[in-house]
Image: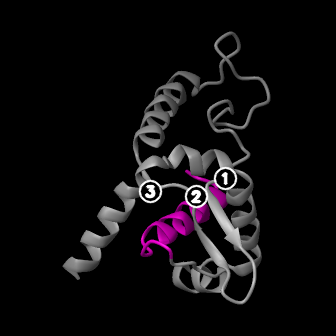
Amino acid sequence: MFTRSAEYGIRAMTYLAMQKGGKLSGAREISSAEKIPMPFLWKILRLLTQSKLIRSFKGIRGGYELAQPADKITLNDVFLATDRRKFRESCVLGLPECDNQSPCPLHEQWKQIRMEMTHMLDHTYLADLVRVTERRRKSR
């Protein structure tokens, strides 16, 4: 349902959120840990930096870190930074004209799903993903 950019953005941000405070993570480290192709990751990291969700530090000891605490960054923040498709306004069937006045055959169903997804993105924080990921790792 998410674009690959949004998926990779959420995975990269979750990885950064799991690091100890003050630790910078390099792009190669993130790429290797999350299995994200480097060229794609560079693009994602640039978008996240431009959106002020992460900070970038250059140099030998450089890398990336979250720009604010994980409990302040919603999935919607990451989604908006990485997904230019604007699912909130687009037609599920990809039709150019689809709105309440000229709906596609799935408009009403998609409208409900879109509202639920928007609510989930607005109310799920990176810290929530970190908690679930850490719980899963401990149970293995």
Q: How is the image coloured?
A: one colour
Look at the picture and state if 121 lies above or below 70: above
Image mark for residue 67 = 2
Marks 1,2: beta carbons within 8 A: yes
Q: Helix, strand or loop at disc 3? A: helix
Look at the picture and state if 47 lies above or below 110: below
Specify whether 77 is left or right of 14: right
- Dot 3, crowdedness within 10 Å: few (<14), some or many (≥20)? many
CA distance separating discs 1 and 2: 6 Å
Image quadrant of residue 132?
A: bottom left
CA distance separating discs 2 and 3: 9 Å
Of the pair 48 and 24, the residue shown nearer to us: 24
Marks 2,3: beta carbons within 8 A: no
Q: Earlier in the sequence, mark 1 or mark 3?
A: 1
* Residue denoted by label 3: 70
* Residue denoted by label 1: 52
| Residue appearing at x 61%, y 25% in the figure | 105
Q: Amino acid at mark 1?
A: Lys
Q: Amino acid at mark 3?
A: Ala
Of the pair 139 and 55, the residue shown nearer to us: 55
Which stretch appears magenta?
1-22
Q: Amino acid at mark 2?
A: Ala
Q: Quadrant of the C terminus?
A: bottom left
CA distance separating discs 1 and 3: 13 Å
Instruction: Name the mark nearer the viewer: 2 or 3.
Output: 2
Image quadrant of residue 101?
A: top right
- At which x and y percent is residue 87? 64, 38
Query: Is residue 18 on the magenta stretch?
Result: yes
Q: Earlier in the sequence, mark 1 or mark 2?
A: 1
Of the pair 113 and 66, the residue shown nearer to us: 66
Total tally of numbered discs in the picture: 3
